[in-house]
Amino acid sequence: MSRKALFFDVDGTLLSETLHIVPESAKRALLQTREKGNLVFINSGRTICLLRKIKEEVACDGCLCGCGTYIEVAGQVLYSRQIPRHQGQAIKKAIVDFGLDGVLEGTLKCYFQKQESRFEGLRNIKKSAVDSGQCSPFTWDDNCYEFDKFCVFADENSDREGFFAFLEPEIQVIDRGNDFYECVPAGHSKATAIDMVLEKFGIGLEDAYVFGDSSNDLDMFRHVPNGVLMGKHDDVLKPYASFVTKEVEDDGIEYAMKNLGLL
């Protein structure tokens, strides 16, 4: 049997968003499939600085981070793309001018505005970054860093259309729902990252499997024929799924891998 390459989203797929843990069954399944000769990769919207804890818990062959903006295989950087500093400065100004707020996600740290945000969701993200040591002491007032991608929150006081028009065509916007948007340099996605890894290892698309649950997994579900959809998921992925498994808390990863002959 030919070697397979498996690509896993993190939040809501490997990591329970209610229990905030990776189930032991998922850890066991990933270890077993690697022992069988298959390759395992994390493929996340998170940048690499936000994946350190997951990397310690999960046995994998590499990390595809920030929706394809950073790829690390066997501890070596295969690809890295950061938003140029001058463009980053313009983006920060536009976020404020158009009435949004957000987090700038870098390879090393995450960056927030100095003042407390009016968005509860962003305050929660900042608290998590602080608690995990991934919140930079530098704020948006500083111009001494680059970042890979960014996420923004909007409300009734925000000019979404104006902001999105400002970003075109350099930045692609992914609507994550609930007035939350993920913003990624154009030409980068979880699918482009998969192609780079498959090319490196000489593995065809037919031997790739993707596991996901949310709208930022759409590109990889459209691209890869073997799409494993978690029991709790965004409906936008459903037309592209080849297998629907149980929820992450109900051993969904292990269940799918057993049924698909990957263990």
Image (cartoon, rainbow, N blue to C red):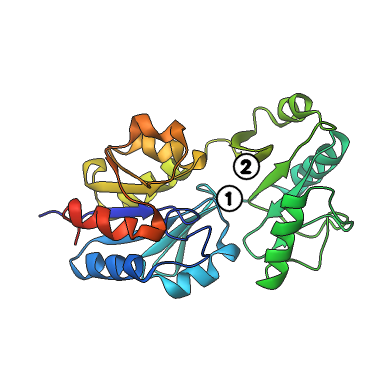
Is residue 227 visible in the rendered image? The answer is yes
Q: Which of 114 and 245 is in front in this view?
A: 245
Q: Nearer the viewer, residue 32 or 65?
A: 32
Q: x, y (%) of residue 61?
A: 35, 65
Q: x, y (%) of residue 81?
A: 58, 50
Q: x, y (%) of residue 171?
A: 64, 35
CA distance separating discs 2 and 1: 16 Å
Is disc 1 surrounded by few (<14), some (14 to 19) or many (20+) residues within 10 Å?
A: some
Disc number for residue 173: none
Q: Is residue 226 above or below residue 78?
A: above
Q: In this view, does 98 lie above or below 231?
A: above
Which residue is label 1 attached to? Answer: 81
Which residue is label 2 attached to? Answer: 182
Is residue 199 visible in the rendered image? The answer is no
Q: x, y (%) of residue 204?
A: 23, 44
- Left/right of residue 73 with respect to residue 163 in the rendered view: left
Q: Are marks 2 and 1 in contact (CB under 8 Å)?
A: no
> The N terminus lies in which quarter of the figure?
bottom left
